Amino acid sequence: MQSFNRFEAEPWSIDGFAIVNGRLYIDGWAFPEDGNDLTSRFFVNGEPVETAIAIDRPDVAKFFERRNRARDCGFHLEHPVTPSISMLEVHCTSRHDTARVRARNSVFVPLKGAPVERPVPSAEQRFRVIGNRDLDGFLRIGCTDAHKLLTLIRADFPRLREVRALDWGVGCGRIARHTSDLFGSFTGVDIDADNVGWCSANLPGRYETILLRERTQFPSGEFDVIYGVSVFTHLREDIQDLWLDELRRLLRPGGRAYITVHGRTAVEYSCRPAAEIAAAVSRLEREQFFVSNVNHQLDGFVPEPGEYVNVFHHPDYVLRHWRKYFEHIEIIPGYIYTHDLVVVQR
Ligand SMILES: C[S@@+](CC[C@H](N)C(=O)[O-])C[C@H]1O[C@@H](n2cnc3c(N)ncnc32)[C@H](O)[C@@H]1O
């Protein structure tokens, strides 16, 4: 098997995290780079991390066999933190970072304040949006995804207080709990009425239940910004076309949408045997868009559960097909962890 130096979007991950007696402890993994020592790459709230120890990780390497030096990826970090800190940003630098995607390499951990103190949805409500019941992950990854989106949205629309935002596929507010009170107005919609009800009762903003394949009741041009995390990853092509058209209608001219898809990054990161990954990569190259399987996470909570599927998009497909709906399209690989982010403008 041919090994290669790096992925288009390199993954890195925090596995364990604790603060004990004013000291932060983190375990995780990030692939090493030639000429860039793994242990000097980490920053905590902008400061170089105090202690970093490299650790052998054969367990991670087994899923990334093609990446050379994959087993050298483990790290243990320690850093002092003061009690007043309300949010941690752990940043992993890379020589390959561009200014645009630097935010991709940060993990944000909320420690106190509204997003942490708000009620949390039940384990079953969380399971329907992320496929597991881990509360720490729900808060940490939700906060991280929110900050990554906000970094891009702020660059495009510096005055957030004047922005009318829509969270399309809001679920149980995994991201909305970190974003909804920052915008001028905030709306969340979803086909899962139970989760929409939870958001209405517990988060700032207005929330509405919508139908899988019907347009919304909102007027045209109602929103400056729309984001949709992991919604196009679950819809068949005819339903996607309907929503591409509806999202376009809902954006005002010059408005932007930030939409995630499963692209090459999701295929490359999937923890499966190398032969299966190679087969999925060639299927993506060949078919450009495919439904891999039905997803049962929403069974019992939406009217047409068999229509909720797992879908993969080739970047060429997105650039070619979505151009029928939007003027400007940019794809940022691996921006929202395993998802590629597509930024479009009406
Ligand atoms: C994987 S979950 C992600 C939820 C949320 N965006 C997040 O990142 O936590 C996908 C969500 O999209 C919702 N969904 C699926 N089809 C939809 C549609 N046509 N319109 C709005 N929401 C939809 C599902 O009910 C589910 O809550």
Image (spheres, rainbow, N blue to C red):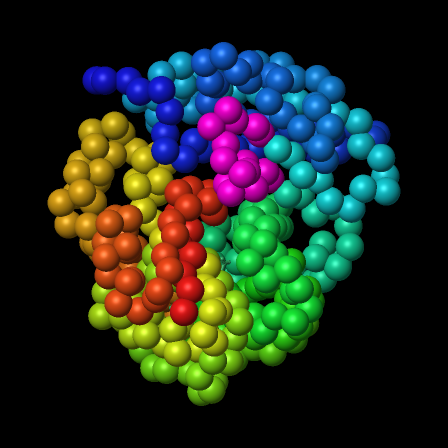
> Residue drawn 28% across and 48% down?
315
State the extent of the magenta-drawn residues as a range: 92-107
Task: Answer with the quadrant where ligand 1 appears in the image.
Answer: bottom left
> Residue drawn 38% across and 49% down?
331
Q: Height in image: 233 above or below 23?
A: below
User: In the rendered image, is residue 57 in sight?
Assistant: no
> Residue drawn 65% across and 71% down?
162
99 within the magenta span:
yes
> Residue drawn 85% across and 35% down?
82
Q: Where does the C terminus fall, quadrant-wise?
A: bottom left
Q: Height in image: 145 above or below 163?
A: above
Query: In screen coordinates, is 49 left or right of 335?
Result: right
Q: Height in image: 275 above or below 146?
A: above
Give the percent coordinates (x, y) of residue 178. Answer: 65, 58
- Front residue of 127/323: it is 323
- Front residue of 173/121: it is 173
